Image (spheres, rainbow, N blue to C red):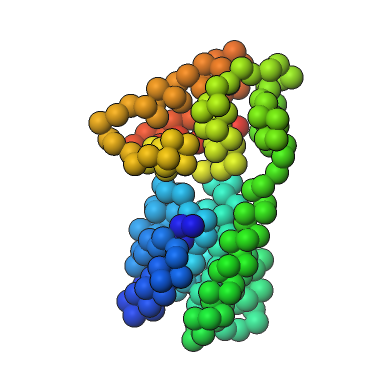
């Protein structure tokens, strides 16, 4: 599980990174809002832990932009802003949890586990659909506009990954690790070739294109580029 921590207080950020890594998670730590936002939209994470008062871009702005990007990634606010109004605003703006500083690490860890379980359950569905594209996960069948798509096993796995993360930009390295269970070598074009073959079946016969290249970042599947 990958967690992004966006926290400008060095001691708290380092404390969170160390504690969560010891709990078995992979942590990326950003120390200002702008870096945190770019990291959130350019890489895949299972959870974001987000401070409110940040340099460059505050937590409210980051969360708003993440949600506008159609991302349903769980977000926990971790902040010293402890008024009832702040909590209501935080949860109302699309946050999944709101924890006030100072905090007990055991409580934070319990909340992290709950959010990750919730996120996993949301992703697990037998039937996935984006526009006219439908995937039957149990039967490993795909169709678009009620026409059967003849996909190889790897093509189906790649399409499933893109659909489950609709609207999120997936890097080539992440795709390689999830579909091929391999470390990404920048000298190989296996991901680009696989995407090209998948597009030929999923997009080329239809007017609306779903698979989009995000230059310098990776690929995403969505109804809008």
Is 183 left or right of 61, judged from the image as shown?
left
Q: In this view of the protein, can residue 207 be seen by the observer?
A: no
Is 126 left or right of 29, judged from the image as shown?
right
Q: Nearer the viewer, residue 160 or 37?
A: 160
Residue at image point 66% right, 29% down: 140
Q: In this view of the protein, can residue 118 be seen by the observer?
A: yes
Residue occupying the far left of the picture: 187
Q: Is residue 119 above or below residue 54?
A: above
Q: Quadrant of residue 128?
A: top right
Q: Is residue 125 above or below residue 137?
A: below
Give x and y (percent) for residue 194.
44, 24
Give x and y (percent) for residue 1.
49, 57
Q: Quadrant of residue 114?
A: bottom right
Give x and y (percent) for residue 161.
55, 38
Residue at image point 47% right, 19% down: 197
Q: Nearer the viewer, residue 125 or 33?
A: 125
Give x and y (percent) for residue 102.
49, 86
Residue at image point 72% right, 39% down: 126
């Amino acid at each position: 599980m990958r967690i992004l921590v966006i926290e400008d207080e060095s001691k708290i950020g380092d404390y969170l990174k160390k504690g969560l890594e010891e709990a078995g998670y992979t942590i990326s730590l950003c120390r200002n809002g702008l870096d945190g936002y770019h990291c959130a939209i350019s890489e895949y994470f299972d959870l974001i832990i987000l401070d409110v008062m940040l340099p460059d871009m505050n937590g409210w702005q980051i969360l708003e932009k993440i949600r506008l990007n159609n991302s349903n990634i769980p977000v926990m606010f971790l902040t010293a802003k402890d008024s009832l109004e702040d909590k209501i605003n935080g949860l109302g703006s699309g946050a999944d949890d709101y924890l006030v500083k100072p905090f007990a690490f055991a409580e934070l860890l319990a909340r992290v586990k709950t959010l990750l379980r919730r996120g996993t359950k949301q992703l697990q569905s037998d039937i996935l659909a984006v526009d006219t594209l439908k995937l039957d996960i149990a039967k490993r069948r795909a169709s678009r506009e009620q026409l059967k798509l003849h996909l190889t096993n790897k093509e189906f796995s790649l399409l499933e990954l893109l659909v489950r993360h609709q609207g999120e930009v997936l890097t080539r390295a992440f795709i390689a690790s999830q579909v091929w269970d391999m470390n990404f070598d920048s000298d190989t074009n296996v991901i680009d070739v696989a995407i090209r073959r998948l597009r030929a079946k999923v997009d080329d016969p239809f007017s609306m294109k779903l698979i989009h290249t995000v230059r310098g970042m990776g690929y995403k599947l969505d109804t809008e580029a």
